Amino acid sequence: GQKAHTSVHSLISGDYCFQIFDKFGDGLCCEQGKGSYKVIAEDGGVFIDSDNTDEGQFGYQSKEVCFNVGFDHGEITEVYKMAVKVLHDDFAQEQSWEILDEITGESIMAVNSTDLQNNALVSTPVFLPRGRYSFTIFDAWDDGMCCGFGNGKYGVFLEDKLLFGGGKFGSSQTNGFEVYY
C-alpha cells in the first residue's frame, strides 16, 4: 500500500528551490499508484502542489520550483532561478553590473568586480519573481570586456537558457528582459 511521508522544515528568510528525485525514473504516478506532493506554508496555504505542476508524472526528477521566504512576515513568493555569468578580461575591477526593476526603477542587485577576478569566470545566482527588468553591464575604462585586454564576455540565463550576452561594448550595455510576465 501507499504510505504518506511528511517532512517539516522551518525556513529562514531567503531563496529556495524544491524538487523531487526518483531513482527508478517512474515519478509518483501511475503504475505503482497515484502519488502526489505538496509544499505547505506555515499558515496552511498550499504553495506547491503536484496536481498543478506535473501530477506526479515526471520520470527521474520533478519540475524545480523556486520561491522566496520574505523577511517581514514569512510570506512566500514564487521566484525563478537565473544566473549572471561573467568571464572577466584582464581588468575585472573595471567591470560591474546591475539589475533594475523596470516598473519601479528599484535596483534589485548590483555587483562590483575586483582584480582578484581577472580572467576568471564568475557565476552569480539570481532569484527574481515575475516581472520586467533591465540588466546593465558597465566598464569603467569604456572599452568593454573584449578583445583588447583579454576575451571577456557575459551571459544572463533564465532557468539555464541564455537570454542574452556579449562582451564588445564601450562604457555599458543594457538589455531589457521579462521573467514570465
Image: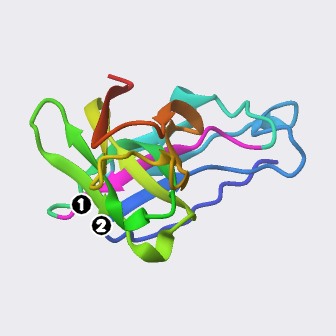
Nearest to the eye among marks 1 and 2: give it. Answer: 2
Q: Point out the image quarter for the C terminus.
A: top left
Q: Residue at x 55, y 52 (%)?
A: 18
Q: Name the image quarter holding residue 105.
A: top left
Which range of residues does the magenta coloring cover?
Answer: 61-71
Query: Quick one: SS at disc 1?
Result: loop
Q: Are marks 1 and 2 in contact (CB under 8 Å)?
A: yes
Q: Where is residue 53 shown, x and y percent of the image?
A: 56, 30
Left or right, residue 140 beside residue 144: left
Give the crowd class for mark 1: few <14, some 14-19, many >=20 residues within 10 Å: some
Left-right relation of 123 to 96: right
Q: Is residue 64 magenta?
A: yes
Residue 170 lies, in percent from the top left, at 32, 39
Residue drawn at x 33%, y 61% is 94
Residue appearing at x 29%, y 41% in the figure: 172
Looking at the picture, which amino acid does disc 1 mark? Gly
Q: From mark 1 to mark 2, how far is it between C-alphas? A: 7 Å
Find disc 1 in the rendering and name its residue. Answer: 74
Q: Nearer the viewer, residue 11 or 174?
A: 174
Q: Is residue 41 visible?
A: no
Furthest residue toward front: 148
- Residue at the spot of label 2: 13
